[in-house]
Image: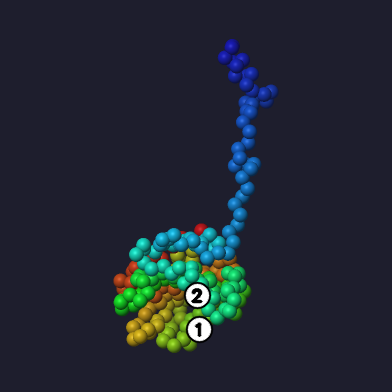
Amino acid sequence: MIGLLAVFSACDNTGKKETNNPPSNTETNTPPPAPAVLNYGVQNGGAYDNDFFGVKLTVPDDWYVQSREENAAREQMGNDVPQPIESLQTIYLLQAYMHEPGSVVEYNAGINMVASNLSQNSTGGNVDDYMKELLNNLSMTRGYSITDRTLSDVVVGGVKMRSATGQVTIEGIKISQQYLAVFRQGYAMQITLSWANDVQKNALNNVLKTAQFY
């Protein structure tokens, strides 16, 4: 009986046990995380992560990754006054090569990832239109050959991207390229792989397998 009284005395009239623990901070005092803003992403060694576009991938530690200053020199080309990231038509997110530029190799294979502002782009409202204009522009560029304009689906990091291929001749060397694109956050995210032989192609595909969209 004493034991039963002890149990019931800890309960209210409804039979529910009373608790005096205050609400946890996670329920009352922790604000939700602020949404990510447009940014260039974070490069840490070979690991790249951009929380605005929700993408990350990793290149081997011995590859050459261009610095933000090197990328800015390309995306700001022609601007007398440096433009803020929101005003840029093309944002250079990641440029990585198997060797340091200037190395004595047949061809320095690499991967690059850019984001094209769709509000400043003349393409239609879907990825296929964007890819078709890309292939048209490349076909009019010296050295490029776009013999097959077939578009296909390739799943990269859990996201379906549209894919096309082309070739470019640089100093007599035939370079193969794969172009991948997906629309995210009002931008066309484009990944380009460039290689001269199967060894380089396999190395680039291994890098692409590390990509994750979130």
Of circles 1 and 2, the one toward us is: 2
Residue 141 vs residue 148, the one in the foreground: 141
The answer to whether residue 18 is left or right of residue 66 is right
Q: How is the image coloured?
A: rainbow
Disc 2 target residue: 73
CB contact under 8 Å: marks 1 and 2: no
Element assignment for label 2: helix
**Hey, what amino acid is under mark 1?**
Asn
Q: Quadrant of the N terminus?
A: top right
Task: Residue at 50% x, 80% y: name it.
Answer: 134
Relative to 199, is 33 above or below? Answer: above
- Percent of width and height locating residue 71: 48, 72
Q: Quadrant of residue 198?
A: bottom left
Viewer-side residue, 62 vs 151? 62
Q: Amino acid at mark 2?
A: Ala
Measured Cα–Cα span from mark 1 to mark 2: 22 Å
Name the image quarter holding residue 205: bottom left
Disc count in the image?
2
| Residue 139, image x, y percentages | 46, 85
x then y, percent, for residue 186: 59, 68
Q: Identify which residue is drawn at 62% across, 21% down.
A: 10
Q: Secondary structure at mark 1?
A: helix
Give the residue furthest to the front: 80
Q: Name the residue at 45% across, 68% down.
A: 67
Q: Position of residue 208 (x, y in %)?
A: 41, 66
As drawn, the residue found furthest toward the right would be 13
Which disc number belongs to residue 137?
1
| Front-most of residues 173 and 151 | 173
